[in-house]
Amino acid sequence: MTWLLLVALAVPVVVAVVLLTRAPDGLVRAAPLALVPVVAVDLLGPAGGVVLRLDLVGRPLLLFVGVLYAAALALTARSADARTASRSGLLLVAFVGTATVLVAADAVTFLAGCVVTTVGAHRLILHPRTVTARRAGRLYLVLAVASDAVLAVAVVLVVAAGGLRLADAPAAVAAAPAGGVIVGLLLLGFGIKAATFPLHGWLPIDEAAASVPVGAVLSGTVVKVGLVGWLRFLPLGHEAMPGWGTVLVVAALVGAFGVLVPGVLTDDPEVSLAYSTVGQMGFLAMVVGVALGAPDLAEACVLTAVVYAVHHGMAKGGLIMAVEVWERYGAGRARAVVLGGALVLGLAITGAPLGSGAVAKYTAKRAVGDAPFLVDVTAVLPFVATVSTLLLVRALVLLRASGHAGPADPDAGLWSWAVLAVGGTVGTWVLAWLWLPPEKVPGLDAVTAWGAAWPILLGLAVAGLVLAAARAGVLPAWTRTLRIPAGDLLEAVARGFDRSADGSVDRPVDARTRRDGGTIGRSTR
């Protein structure tokens, strides 16, 4: 099975090389098929080896990553951009890096996958060749290289402690004399990759600069590299580290709720969606923090984190793609498909009953219910859905105000996105039924449904009041003009460096201007 996985990963590598060098006609549209061998091997079942392995963590994540990248490639192939082939090749490079992270059996291979992901993501961010893209690429590269450097030190310490194989890494970290230092390095290095507060600023900046399919994979898959790193290396279930666990839980909760302000005070719908991702990754970081502080809850938290990651990756990646799907197909014969798919994805992100978010958030609440922290984690979790609802409403308002529905007829790009929208919900429920104990899967009773619905209704009520007040002209004047730049804290630091370098500030392009020089709502990417 290991050699099959190697062959399967070699296929997108070869296609990527060809796309980046020769790009023969027809290969761009066939690029999604390069991921079929990886998905097929993943479906065959678990596999173990010295370098690569497919286990209960990697298999479901690899499946959703393959589906999401295939949809991004299909949507990219429908672009009229002359540089579509190179973008498709870079998407395949990023996929290979992420897939390597998911199937790595040893620490060195895992770190190599992180580096390849960094290279692919960086080149994708730079791909539009605009001033905004170059600036965003610089900021991403600085943070990503810092992350990889910190992780290289951590990996050296883990290997020295006997954790070369990832199966042995958590126990090795727990037994290492410098275990606390290693955990701190792992939290920092993977925290950057997971866009966890206060290390999150790169994601909104890059979402504003990259093309829509690239933004979808950044929010859907690239940030999951940080989560997988925590699950692979942290001593979850081996040693209680309540200090580090509390630090991660507090940072995660601050991020989950703090994203509301910059996510609302923006004029770019994709920035709002990026901050929603930061909040959702805060939710996942909180689950990991609970597992780190309470070893007896670790197993349930790990399973929950994987289920939640599958849900979020499919739903958020699809929702970001919906921006371009609407711009391309929203006024054509497929309008109902576009609206229906966007509704399914939006309800999934907020955690509405029957959606993928409902099962993911229910399992998370059950997993952390006995967490020994000063803050009642389960009491505040529902309000994460309220924040998500407000951010999605803001994104919808911005998209409606500035976007224009396109008249294109249905094609492979649309149908791949529709499969992603429906498959994310179905796949999350199937994974929960197959993997989790029955008591951790939500029922269909009225009490469970109301528990999932009331945070969303609260968010809609607050949004409705704000919109009504805005139309009545009773909101303070500053609410109409105050905007927080994408990246917030990171942007403030970057501007400080810009000033110190040459006395001027390299300001981002106005959010109303598209990353490629067009206007929002026109598919000029």
Image: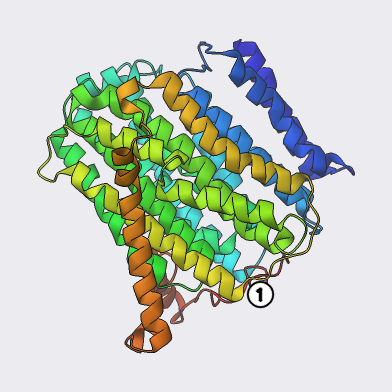
The C terminus sits in image quarter: bottom right
| Callout 1 amino acid | Thr
On the picture, is 217 further left or further right than 14? Answer: left
Question: Mark 1 = which residue?
Answer: 519
Q: Secondary structure at mark 1?
A: loop
Which corner quadrant of the image does residue 304 belong to?
top left
At 63% from the left and 51% from the top, the residue drawn is: 213
Residue 482 spot, x, y in % from top left: 38, 81
Residue 205 spot, x, y in % from top left: 49, 62
Residue 242 spot, x, y in % from top left: 14, 35
On the picture, is 213 further left or further right than 61? Answer: right
At 16% from the left and 27% from the top, the residue drawn is: 240
Residue 208 spot, x, y in % from top left: 54, 64
Q: Residue furthest left?
A: 374
The N terminus sits in image quarter: top right
> In the rendered image of this protein, does residue 329 appear above or below residue 429?
below
